[in-house]
Image (spheres, coloured by chain):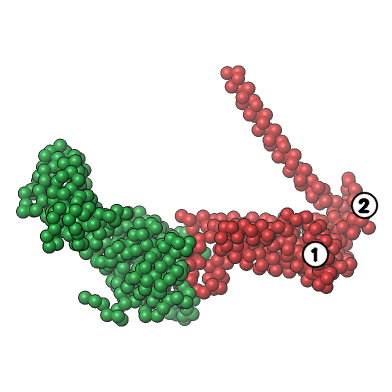
Chain colours: A green, B red
Amino acid sequence: MKPNADEILVRFNGVNKSYDGSNLVVSDLNLEVRRGEFLSLLGASGSGKTTTLMMLAGFERPSSGAIELGGKPLDNVPPWQRDIGIVFQSYALFPHMTVADNIAFPLKQRRRSAAEIDERVKAMLALVKLEGMADRLPAQLSGGQQQRVALARALVFDPALVLMDEPLGALDKRLREHMQLELKRIHERLGVTIVYVTHDQGEALVMSDRVAVFAGGRIRQLASPTELYERPADALVADFVGENNRLEGKVTKIAEGHCQVTLGNGLVVTAMAPQPLDPGQSVVLALRPERVVVGAVESAENHQTAIVASVVYLGDHARLELAVGGLTLVAKVPNDARYRAPQAGERVTIAWRSEDCRAFAGNDRN
Amino acid sequence: MKSDRSVTMTERVFDLGAKLIAVLVAIFLVTPILVIFPLSFTSDSLMIFPLPGVSMRWYVDFFTNPVWLTALRNSLMLAVVTMVVATVLGTLAALGLVRLSRGWRSVVSTLLLSPLIVPVIIIGVGTFFYFARLGLAGSFFGLVLAHTVLALPLVVIAVTATLEGFDPNLVRAAYASGASPFPAFWHVTRPLIMPGIATGATFAFITSFDEIVCVIFLGGPEFRTLPRQIWSGAKETVTPTIAVAAVLLVVASVVMTLVVEALRKRAQRLSKGAAT
């Protein structure tokens, strides 16, 4: 389903950015952000995701190309006139102002009435669950609480768009997971459009409506979390999102969407071929560890015999390293009532369906 | 055992020696300043030890003598105006300086700080001939300009130091909140770098308050400041009133330095708290 033009809030048109005039940090970026969606920009450091966010915020200028917000070009609009809320990784709370003054700051800049400011600040404190903290200074708050104040300050003036630059990066794991759900709740409640930068794929999958995977200044895939995980567009996306077994080989046969691949150790497997491939071409196979079935015989196209090299017990599942004719495969097996995880050294049968194994042209190892 | 002991002995001697030297240096530095204090309370009209008696008569003389009062007023006026001009310009310069690229930054800051290195007498002579041509020699305004040149580097150093620990994302957060550059500076940057500005302003004030070389070159014969009056007093009519004037200069400097130190400590507490 193609979104209507009026549903598009932000549009990047062929945007390039270079700091030194020769190396492109962002190259030929075309991206549309839909009104009301939670879009994550996911990538390693140096992939161009933060630069993209900074251009949208107005702190960096594109070297060429155009960015539109609500159908209007942003070229000559300074950051303070863009009406975009921003949550920084370092929170960037004003240390000399109380929590209430921090949240009130954007409204004061907009010369709202004292009564309105008072009411909005109260509503925001309730939204981020910080009632009773209004008169504290940022230094008197925990990291998680400071994060909530930063969020409230970015939301208080009802911006059409809120940008977040790794806002949960400084929090510990448990708090981070809690805040992810909080952010999702706030997004659903307010219906605000959020563009969220992160290098944490798990975080991107949990919160986003869509995820743009960045690498080398380009978007490698823009899709829903399910799509991204189930049908990665290339080997890099498969590696970056979730855990992945990476097998290298050569195409020996092709038949309507499927192909037969001979691996380096001589094993022959069948796989899905989402991209057009030629016989003889080097390919990379991507296979999710949880799709490798261990011990049970199923009607799967790929059967192999393997030796269990190691077993790591992880509570709800066990992680196996399997030696298959000189290759190592990782498999995750569930820890449930009907199933016994094999022991290290055991010889087992493993199987996977060809739909769960995807072949990609092997020249883009980066 | 024996060698062990001799090591500790050597250490002790060195430790004691270092302390002794530190105390001697402190005495060397402070005595000339402290000597003037008892002399200002002498009851005699000669500045000699031992004091024949203690009295406040020279303080009364200072605060009733129109020559000294005019000098005090001139000094204060000159120092306050210099402080305002140097603080505003120096703060702006520091704000601009931290935005420059590394190369340009070192060039411009060397230029800005050069008055600290150039001998004051050179600045005095140079500005005298230059200002004479412009008709500024002998004017209050010309003197303010010359003192600003001397005070500006101190403001730049003090403000740059506080700006270095300043999170640039705070300004971006202010922009994102809808504040354009001036309100962002006024509500966010200024309050946070205030300790640096105050330190710079104090040093600017003190620099101008006790400066004499430029005053002699540019001040004109009628314009007398405290240092100049002390100087001519010491040459012509030596009375303990000049000791009183000197004490006032010292006390003003000490008080202002203490105020700055207190401000700095308070700011440190604030930023330490923010870091956790």
Q: Residue A323 got which mark?
A: none
Image quarter where the N terminus of chain B lies is top right
Residue placed furthest toward the top? B2
In the rendering, at what x and y percent does residue B272 appear?
51, 55
- For label 1, the SS is helix
Residue located 17% across and 56% down the image: A279
In the rendering, at what x and y percent does residue B84 appear?
69, 68
The residue tagged 2 is B46
Chain letter for mark 2, please: B
Q: Quadrant of residue B20?
A: top right
Kind of residue at badge 2: Leu
Residue mark closest to the camera, 2 vs 1: 1
Residue B66 higher or lower than B59, as above or below = below
Left or right of residue A293, residue B23 in this image? right
Residue A31 higher or lower than A321, as above or below = below
The residue tagged 1 is B127
Q: Quadrant of residue B132?
A: bottom right
Q: Quadrant of residue A75?
A: bottom left
Residue A192 higher or lower than B60, as above or below = below
Binning the other alpha carbons within 10 Å of mark 1 as few (below 14), some (14 to 19) or many (20 upward) gives many
Asked if residue A97 can be seen in this view, the reply is no
Asked if residue A52 can be seen in this view, the reply is yes
In the rendering, at what x and y percent does residue A52 appear?
39, 66
Residue located 31% across and 68% down the image: A39
Left or right of residue B188, residue B73 in this image? right
Q: Earlier in the sequence, mark 2 or mark 1?
A: 2
Kind of residue at badge 1: Thr
In the rendering, at what x and y percent does residue A43 appear?
34, 59
Q: Are marks 2 and 1 on the same chain?
A: yes
Residue located 60% across and 65% down the image: B96
B199 vs A63, nearest the viewer: A63
